Image (tube, helix red, strand yellow):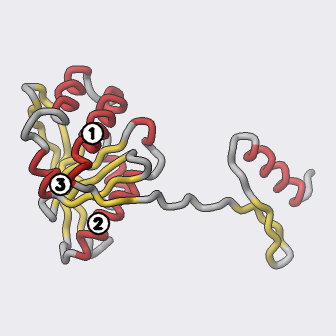
């Protein structure tokens, strides 16, 4: 049987071999292995000159990830919205939002009581961008005196939203370019969050 210090050292070495670095600390006569917490990603406000960038992120998110849950026809119709004149313009111009990381993801509230867009590039998926953006958008809404946010979530974003305390109000079917999609009307009460 290995001693505790030997076990910690073995665990530390094994985790280091896959790129995780830990540190052994002694507290109250006990040794424990600790790992640094993930650092928050830098967020910045979306500016008017970011509209092309957010369109790129939008299209990339759909083209690189939606194929897991949607047909090719659905992916093409949905991704095309990024570039169609007038479709997203008002949301970009009048909405309030944030870009995460090195231009990896974005979220926009429009109108102020609705999460209109939340998209993350495929190369940056599952790295915390969506969670951090949701946290910021919710904080902004609370600061604006808003008590409840709503959204229409795709099959891709629904699990993240549910983990963050959003609930499904009702499923709905919409058509984009004549192609049907199922999505979910969702809401979150910010006073209980």
Query: Taking 97 as reference, is 83 left or right?
Result: left
**Residue drawn 81% across the image and 47% down it:** 13
* Upstream in sequence: badge 2 or badge 1: 1
Q: Secondary structure at mark 1?
A: helix
Could you classify mark 3 by the number of other residues whose Cα lies within 10 Å: few (under 14), some (14-19), or many (20 or more)?
A: some
Q: Position of residue 116 (x, y in %)?
A: 19, 52
Query: What residue do we see at 85% from left, 53% from top?
Result: 9
First in residue order: circle 3 vs circle 1: 1
**Mark 2 Cα shell of 10 Å, populated few (<14), some (14-19), many (≥20):** many
User: In the drawing, what numbered circle is on residue 58?
Assistant: 1
Percent of width and height locating residue 37: 59, 61
Write down the residue under mark 2: 138
Residue 179 quadrant: top left
Taking depth in this image into account, of 47 and 159 the one nearest to the observer is 47
- Mark 2 or 3, closer to the camera: 2
- Whichever of labels 2 and 3 marks the residue nearer the N terminus, that label is 2
Please say if 118 is above or below 67: below
Is residue 186 among the parts visible in the rendering? no
In this figure, which residue is indicated by the disc labeled 3? 169
């Amino acid at each position: 049987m290995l001693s505790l210090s030997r076990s910690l050292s073995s665990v530390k070495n094994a985790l280091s071999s896959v790129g995780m670095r830990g540190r052994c600390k002694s507290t109250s006569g006990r040794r424990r292995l600790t790992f640094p917490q993930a650092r928050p990603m830098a967020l910045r406000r979306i500016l008017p000159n970011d509209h092309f960038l957010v369109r790129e992120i939008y299209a990339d998110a759909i083209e690189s990830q939606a194929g897991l849950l949607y047909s090719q026809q659905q992916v093409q119709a949905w991704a095309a919205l990024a570039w169609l004149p007038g479709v997203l313009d008002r949301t970009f111009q009048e909405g309030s939002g944030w870009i995460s990381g090195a231009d990896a993801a974005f979220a926009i509230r429009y109108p102020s009581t609705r999460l209109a867009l939340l998209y993350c590039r495929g190369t940056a998926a599952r790295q915390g961008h969506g969670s951090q953006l949701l946290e910021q958008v919710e904080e902004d809404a609370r600061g604006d005196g808003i008590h409840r946010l709503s959204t229409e979530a795709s099959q891709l974003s629904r699990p993240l939203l549910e983990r963050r305390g959003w609930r499904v109000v009702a499923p709905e079917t919409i058509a984009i370019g004549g192609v049907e999609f199922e999505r979910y009307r969702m809401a979150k009460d910010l006073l209980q969050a």
